[in-house]
Amino acid sequence: MWHKVRFGVLVGMLLAGGLWATSHHHKHAHKKQQQEEKQLEGPQPLVSDTEIGLRTIPLEDEKDLKLHSYDFHKKPPGESQRFERAYENAPPMIPHDTTGLLPITKESNQCLGCHAPDVASSVGATPVPKSHLFDFRNNHPTKDGNVSDARFNCTQCHAPQANAQPLVKNNFKPVFTNKTLEFRSDFMDVVDVGVKGANTKGSSKP
């Protein structure tokens, strides 16, 4: 009795295996045939540079380019309204007119005339945060409390505010751990959070 059962199971397994192998072979052969047919059709057309983004005109020709209208804020420093940061510790936008303040060069950074920590409170400006006075490459505060060379070019992170409308709808809503961080940074207090073996409060970082 058991011999018949085992024989039946064995036959069933062989049949199932044979069917699977046949099916697999046909699928492989069909796929190979499709690839060969595709090769015979020749190279597929490349995606046009007018189809790879929101810009719909050729990248090498700007004669038909039409920019959306927008205006930068014209109010001078001290008279403009700040926007909250895009997210916690994000670089804030420049809320005032920058006419005459740019470009920033290694010899001249007029932003620091108001935003340097020893000046900001007296003119009602936001002081540069502690992270700008720290040399992250060498892991120590900058000499004489000056702005780090890596942070000296303000406009590599900070951009003027404009009334431009977003081209793509964005539903992102920032969540701040406390209300004050909408307009200030605590980056140096949290930069090492979750980093194993990192410096803790009271270390060389300010």
Image (tube, rainbow, N blue to C red):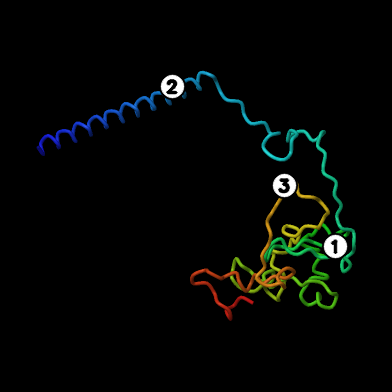
Q: Amino acid at mark 2?
A: Gln
Relative to 34, 162 lies left or right: right
Name the outermost residue toward the top.
Answer: 40
Q: Are marks 3 and 1 in contact (CB under 8 Å)?
A: no
7 in relation to 110, above or below: above
Q: Amino acid at mark 3?
A: Val
Q: Dot 1: what SS?
A: loop
Q: Earlier in the sequence, mark 3 or mark 2?
A: 2
Residue 168, numbered circle: 3
Any part of residue 150 in sight: no
Residue at the (72%, 47%) spot, across then down:
168
Relative to 194, 165 lies left or right: right
Q: Earlier in the sequence, mark 3 or mark 1?
A: 1
Could you tell me which quadrant the C terminus lies in? bottom right
Q: Amino acid at mark 1?
A: His
Any part of residue 57 in sight: yes
Q: Earlier in the sequence, mark 1 or mark 2?
A: 2
Residue at the (89%, 67%) spot, across then down:
79
Name the outermost residue toward the front.
Answer: 1
Q: Dot 2: what SS?
A: helix
Q: Dot 3: what SS?
A: loop
**Which residue is identified by label 2?**
33
Residue 96, numbered circle: 1
175 in relation to 54, above or below: below
187 in relation to 102, above or below: below
Residue at the (43%, 26%) spot, across then down:
31
Q: Residues within 10 Å of mark 2 (few under 14, many from 20)?
A: few
Q: Where residue 137 sits: x, y (%)?
A: 60, 66
Residue at the (81%, 51%) spot, across then down:
164
Q: Residues within 10 Å of mark 3 (few under 14, many from 20)?
A: few
Q: Where residue 82 sits: x, y (%)?
A: 81, 65
